Amino acid sequence: MPQYGLKYRNMKHQGRHDFRFLDPRKPALISTLLFLLAGATWIAAQAPDQTAPTFKVSVNYVDVDVTVTDANGQFARGLTRSDFELLEDGVPQKIEAFSLVELPNARPGGVRFSGRVVPADVRSNRDVASGRVYLIVLDDLNVSSFRTSQVRKNARQFVEQNFGEHDIAAVVSTSGRKQVAQEFTSDPARLLAAIDGFIGQRLRSAEEERIDNYYQAQLLSGLNEQTQTDDPQNSTTVLNPITRNMSFDPSNLEREQRAVGVLDTLRNLATYLEGVRGRRKALLLFSEGLDYPMADVFSSAGGNVIARATQDALNAAARANVNFYTIDPRGLIGMSTDLLETMKTAGPDYAGTDPTRPVGTPYSGVQALMAEMRLTQDSLRTLAEGTGGFAAVDTNSVSEVFDRIVRTNGQYYLLGYTPPNHPRNGRFHRIEVRVKRPGLKASARRGYPSPSGKTPDEERREQATRRALDERRGGSTDTSMELRAALNSPVQQGGLALSVHASAFRNTAKDASVALTVELQGDALVFAQQPNGLFTDTPEISYFSLNEDGRAQRGTRSALNLAIRPETYQRVKTLGLRLNTRSTFAAGRYQLRIGARDPATGASGTVFYDLVVPDFTRNPLMLSGLLVSSSAAGSVLTPQRDEISEKLLGAPATSRREFAQSETLKLLTEIYDNLPAQQARQVDLRVRLIAENGQEVFASRDSLANGAGGAKPWSTFTYVGQVPLNNIPPGHYLLRLEAAHTTGGNTASVEAVITVIRGN
């Protein structure tokens, strides 16, 4: 029978906590801080000049990932360190690190139920090294609004069909819109949600502006003045001020600023990924390219600025070993939308003005638009080929493009060496990798640049980048340097395995309480045996948060001073260690960053947990998150306890989602009925266990009176239920709780994926 409890409130805890644990143990609370998820921000080209510390940059280790193919273009396996020769600036270098990286073929993560993929509600860092690292950049500043749906379609296709179970990716737009921002995650649903927020906002074509100018010049030509002389052939026409300025592009300055902003964004993102070592990193840029010259410093007033910003982006990618892959959503070039727009009002063969010739001189508008399109395509090729990636232009088959990206980032050799000391002169140092075996071809990064001096404008942009990165760095000041570095890495670290589950409950009308469960892998913890027979260790736990603007908030460090008996020690080594705690924060989109470190070994691990905390007053009927426990959950040592939920469940909540048939699941959720108290009603609650084929293997139903039949009205109802697994066949199941008003059609649901296995 289900059990019912009353609404509870959590205690707030902040600051540093040290816990001494002796058998018999005493519970203590560890505070958690959640940080608000924020996407990368477009650093404006004209950032204000502010004083910021300058850090010297040095290259003390160089990663070189190498793809080796045979005559048939197939990846060549079985090579050893001795098969490679690595040169920098023509001088052989000692290969100090060598490994073969061969990741499994990407397959979508999550479990599919009735055609719908349901992501796991638990995050772990156990397989972080077996996935690819992607950064999806949606260039809304350089994609026409007409192709918004095409970019969404292409980017969604990559995630839905090519994003592997252990891959991680982030989404960002070049304009910095928060609706198109997702921090690195392994959850495809969150990536898709960010992609769906994309809206193209490219400026109108410069050639279209000139075409309009041509026709306006024709209409205003009557305002020109002609001066006659004795020789009719020497008559002159004095242009009126309006006609005289027809060749000017009023958006030229904004085009320049946008181009610099996009290039700075790419540089910033590459710099951010520089901290991810020992892995190949792919940046996928969905863009129609820059309609501004990237190499010709004499073609425009901002040409020199664009050229330097381009080189800065390429240099940053080289330092971080990031490959750019550029995908043009226009596909095969034919009748572009720009050309179609032009043809609405005029014949395209005479629809432009050549800025190098007198105003009003007709020339081919078709040729002008095609030349502009080639310019934008060249910018995509420059960015891709300059970083070791490739440009997908003039193609309608993105499936082949995505397959190639996945293959390239799943099979390679990773070489590492310490480079010579170089002066800070900005010189590019060329890397060449050769394979000694005949018939094989090696493809690797081209090199890296030494640091160099910067112009005042470039220094201002770099200061803005440093400030943005500094605002993202968090962790309490007493957190160990090693764990703090792991927490601030762009991606999860897997040195110490842990799993995390977070679930939100209503606290007050303005905030929510999050129940957090953290479980550490026990056999990775190293205990010291003391003369009195106890085993001791001091695992370190640290948290920090980012707000909506991406600024790090005050962090918290906790230490578990464990001193346990031999029988408990054996249990910890087998089953692990669990922490249950709570934290209070406002409704919003968050990412929980939790790090753990064992000082005995120095091993650190981090988990990044994406969490949406709803406004629990928004809808007439809502459910909190779901806490899961089992009849075997009490076997895991839990020095940090959430007494409220444990009292209701009869056991600590667990992040484990694999249960034996001998166990009984225990469930906890809260129902929030936000209709007026004077309105009597019934709430139906169903608990269902659904197999992958859609078959329902378990179901229970309860009817809750709310002011009906003399029952006392309530706004919050705590539900505790049980699901026996003894008759459930092994396999994956969807655990789903559904609440509904018996009248009015208001519904709410919460779900989790579990796995049932044989045995005890």
Image (tube, rainbow, N blue to C red):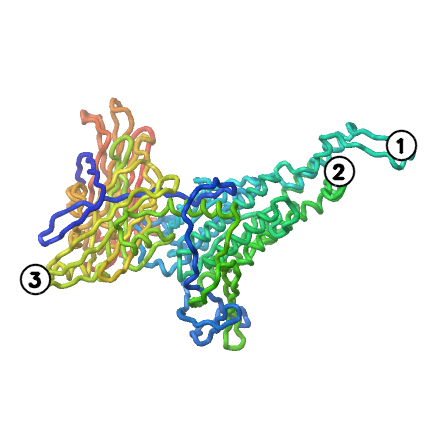
Q: Nearer the viewer, residue 77 or 727?
A: 77
Where 490 falls versus 46 (above or below)?
below
How far apart marks 1 and 3 lie (CA) works out to 116 Å
Q: Is residue 177 visible?
A: yes
Q: Residues within 10 Å of mark 1 (few under 14, many from 20)?
A: few
Determine whether, in the image, residue 667 is placed left or right of residue 350.
left
The residue sitting at 48% across, 54% down in the picture is 283
In contact (CB < 8 Å): disc 1 and disc 3: no
Q: Which residue is mark 3?
A: 532
Which labelled disc corresponds to residue 304?
none
Specify the amino acid type for callout 2: Val
Earlier sequence position, callout 3 versus callout 2: 2
Q: What element does badge 1 sit on?
A: loop
Earlier sequence position, callout 1 versus callout 3: 1
Residue at the outermost left position:
532
Q: Nearer the viewer, residue 738 or 596?
A: 596
Residue 691 % position (x, y): 31, 51
Q: Residues within 10 Å of mark 2 (few under 14, many from 20)?
A: some
Which labelled disc corresponds to residue 229?
1
Q: Residues within 10 Å of mark 3 (few under 14, many from 20)?
A: few
Q: What element does badge 2 sit on?
A: loop
Earlier sequence position, callout 1 versus callout 2: 1
Quadrant position of the C terminus in the picture: bottom left
The residue sitting at 66% across, 39% down in the picture is 208
Q: Which residue is mark 2?
A: 359
Specify the amino acid type for callout 1: Thr
Determine whether, in the image, residue 632 is placed left or right of residue 403.
left
In contact (CB < 8 Å): disc 1 and disc 2: no
Specify the amino acid type for callout 3: Asn
Where 99 falls versus 498 (above or below)?
below
